[in-house]
Amino acid sequence: MEVKVKKDRRITRTKEAINRAFVELFAEKAFDRITINDIAERANVNRATVYLHYADKYDLLDKCIEDHLNQMVTACSLNKSFQQKVTDLFEATEALKSLFAYFEDHFLFFSSMLSSQNTVAFRECMLGITKTLIQKQIDMEGANRGMDPEVTLQFTASAFVGTVEWWIANQMPHPPAMMAEQAMKLLKRHDIYCMV
């Protein structure tokens, strides 16, 4: 049993090295110019090891995106909001702080994905996840009374993703906590308590 644990740790470390190498390369040059040799060399593994874990660089890109988007969701402390409406504003703000801290910790990845013409699909995936997360949080009474729920959802999700893009594109000019507090005030203003 102990041997299996060590093997799993090695596999995890190897995959992390491959992913880190890929993200670094993606930040440096166009996706179509990145080769498996480049990735293997940067990760300090051989080509066969890369192919052991990924079919090709497209598979690596897809899995890297999927992994980061899943981690983005789980980085938040309020995963329960998938099932129920969040009413505690302190908890909601803390969840947003966790989310912005995740963006900060993985700046290179998000910066590369959001600025590349080859990854328009990434923004669409991020927008879709954001829409799913905020759907149950929208109060269609009060400020949103009489509004079409789909329009309200699209507007709010697009505004949030656009704000994250602006923050990352401008080298994170404000700390995560401040961004979370500002986003929370804007969400509250539109009767949406929390998106995470």
Image (cartoon, helix red, strand yellow):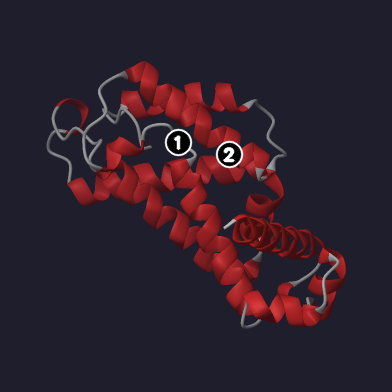
Q: Nearer the viewer, residue 3 or 175?
A: 3
Q: Position of residue 81 (x, y in %)?
A: 29, 37
Q: Position of residue 74 (x, y in %)?
A: 45, 43
Rendered view: 8 above or below 136: below
Rendered view: 60 above or below 98: below
Q: Position of residue 46 (x, y in %)?
A: 82, 77
Q: Secondary structure at mark 2?
A: helix
Residue 76's tag is 1
Q: Nearer the viewer, residue 40 or 30?
A: 40
Q: How many marks?
A: 2
**Amino acid type for the residue under numbered disc 1:** Cys
Residue 52's tag is none
In the rendered image, is residue 32 in sight? no
Residues at circles 2 and 1 in contact by the CB criterion of under 8 Å: yes
Q: Nearer the viewer, residue 116 or 67?
A: 67
Residue at x 74% of width, y 76% of height? 49
In the rendered image, is residue 112 in sight? yes
Question: N-terminal of the two: label 2 or label 1?
Answer: 1
Residue at x 25% of width, y 35% of height? 137
Residue at x 63% of width, y 74% of height? 53
Residue 102's tag is 2
Label 1 CA crowd tier, 10 Å (few <14, some 14–19, many 20+): many
**Amino acid type for the residue under numbered disc 2:** Tyr
* Quarter of the picture holding the N terminus: bottom right
Q: Position of residue 184 (x, y in %)?
A: 41, 25
Relative side of 27 to 129, left or right: right
Q: Secondary structure at mark 1?
A: loop
Cα gap from disc 2 to disc 1, whole angstroms: 9 Å
